[in-house]
Amino acid sequence: MNILVLGSGGREHALAWAIKQNPKCDRLIVAPGNAGIAAIAECAAIDPCDKHAVLELCQQQAIDFVVIGPEAPLAAGVADALRAQGYLTFGPSAQAAQLEASKAFTKAVCDACDAPTAAYARFTQAGPARDYVTAQGAPIVIKADGLAAGKGVIVALTLQEALDGLDEIFAGAFGAAGAEVVIEEFMEGEEASLFILSDGTDIAVIGGAQDHKRVGNGDTGPNTGGMGAYSPAPILNAQVEQKALDEIVRPTIAEMARRGTPFQGVLYAGLMIQNGQPRLVEYNVRFGDPECQALMLRLGAQVLDLLMACAEGRLGDVQPQWADDHAISVVMAAKGYPGSYEKGTVIGGLDMIEENSQQVVFHAGTTAKDGQITATGGRVLNVTARGASLQEAHDRAYAMIEQIDWPEGFWRTDIGWRAL
Ligand code: AMP
Ligand code: GLY
């Protein structure tokens, strides 16, 4: 088969790495890809949100199966355009991608299917929103409705922070994504993510993970896209997972089907767990990054069969096969991230690192230039390892980092601390 993966991050490198190992994969193309992906697949320099360019590439390269990595092409309807032309595609329709693209939409779905989540109210005007926040008091959570690259959420610990957050959003800090605001009850507990494949009707649990969103050790400093992750997540034990599936995930999948907009793809449920009870924080309609890197290392070649079964509506026939193992992914980022950072710095030592089924360095923001790997993004490398225990995976990952020579980079030294 000829397979196309859309995206250019560490998530897509990990997906490509797993797919490539499956004997069903003859040719693998990633658009647009990065320097690490270029070492295992052909890269095509197109914009993954440009439906016309994606369709043209599929036609030129006789693509049999398309896997869409990031949320932007999904929300832009790239999966719809591909399916309309008969291409087998992994990823939800634009309508179903609303589960990530609109927080208000997700809240309405939760209401309709009684899924446990934070109490909330929606506003399109600053005055009533300010009155509501003042009446509720802090802590309280303010969210821009639309896609804001993970930055549209303000967890306000004081009333002033909440009011400032509202002003910022209504002043246009997130553009159209902030035209509507969702104000939520602050939920206490421990967060974990559950990844579920759905073909619209049946589901298959693909695994759980926990990530570290804050930039600094001890979970301090500003939020980021994620500085590291590990799988499995001890807090997501069998009972909590069963509750999350029964009370949140299955009702959501059924509600989406009932509305005539079935969800096909990977549903990433962000959960807040307190006293064994999970509540939904948010949905994403794609794999987490870097959670995906840890999951792919654990799953390996079977990923292609699972994604295809999902796209073909055959999930009822397949079961992910898990080894009793653990994986961890540590993000190396450019100094300054998530603020401004230097681009084009050179990363050394990568070709000396042994890569195998236990350890891989997935690339995120890298480019190959004059025979050297340079950093071109904020999050740059995802050093990923697995082992019989989380400690073993952890030690393997940090030993790889020792071999990487990148003075302009930094990383957290405590990924996995909660579980270790
Ligand atoms: P989201 O983009 O909705 O996942 O929000 C980003 C982060 O904000 C989450 O991972 C949580 O840590 C936090 N958060 C969001 N909503 C709530 C809530 N209702 N209560 C407490 N924390 C929240
Ligand atoms: N690591 C969090 C996310 O992918 O949204």
Image (spheres, rainbow, N blue to C red):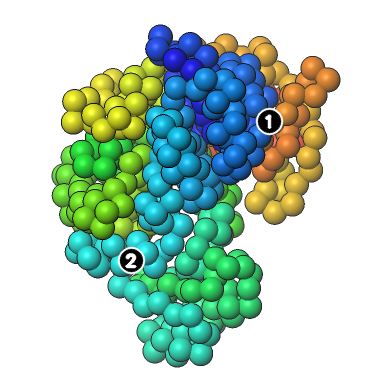
Q: Quadrant of the N terminus?
A: top left
Residue at 25 percent across and 67 percent down: it is: 111
Where is residue 379 shown, x and y percent of the image?
A: 63, 40
Where is residue 371 shown, x and y percent of the image?
A: 79, 17
- Determine which quarter of the picture holds residue 170: bottom right
Q: Quadrant of the C terminus?
A: top left
Where is residue 290 shown, x and y percent of the image?
A: 49, 37
- Determine which quarter of the picture holds residue 303: top left
* Residue lying furthest right: 370
Q: Amino acid at mark 2?
A: Lys
* Left or right side of 299 for 116: left
Residue where numbered disc 2 is placed:
107
Q: Secondary structure at mark 1?
A: loop
* Residue lying furthest front: 85
Q: How many marks?
A: 2
Camera-side residue: 281 or 170? 170
Residue at 49 percent across and 17 percent down: it is: 2
Q: Which mark is residue 45?
A: 1
- Sequence-wise, the earlier of marks 2 and 1 is 1
Q: Secondary structure at mark 2?
A: helix
Camera-side residue: 336 or 151? 151
Residue at 48 percent across and 11 percent down: it is: 26
Q: Label 2: how many residues lie within 10 Å, few (<14), some (14-19) or many (20+)?
A: many
Where is residue 391 shown, x and y percent of the image?
A: 40, 27
Q: Amino acid at mark 1?
A: Ala
* Left or right side of 21 for 407: right
Q: Is residue 288 visible?
A: no
Camera-side residue: 114 or 257? 257
Residue 353 to residue 12: above or below: above
Residue at 31 percent across and 52 percent down: it is: 261
Indicate which label's residue lies in the foreground, 2 or 1.
1
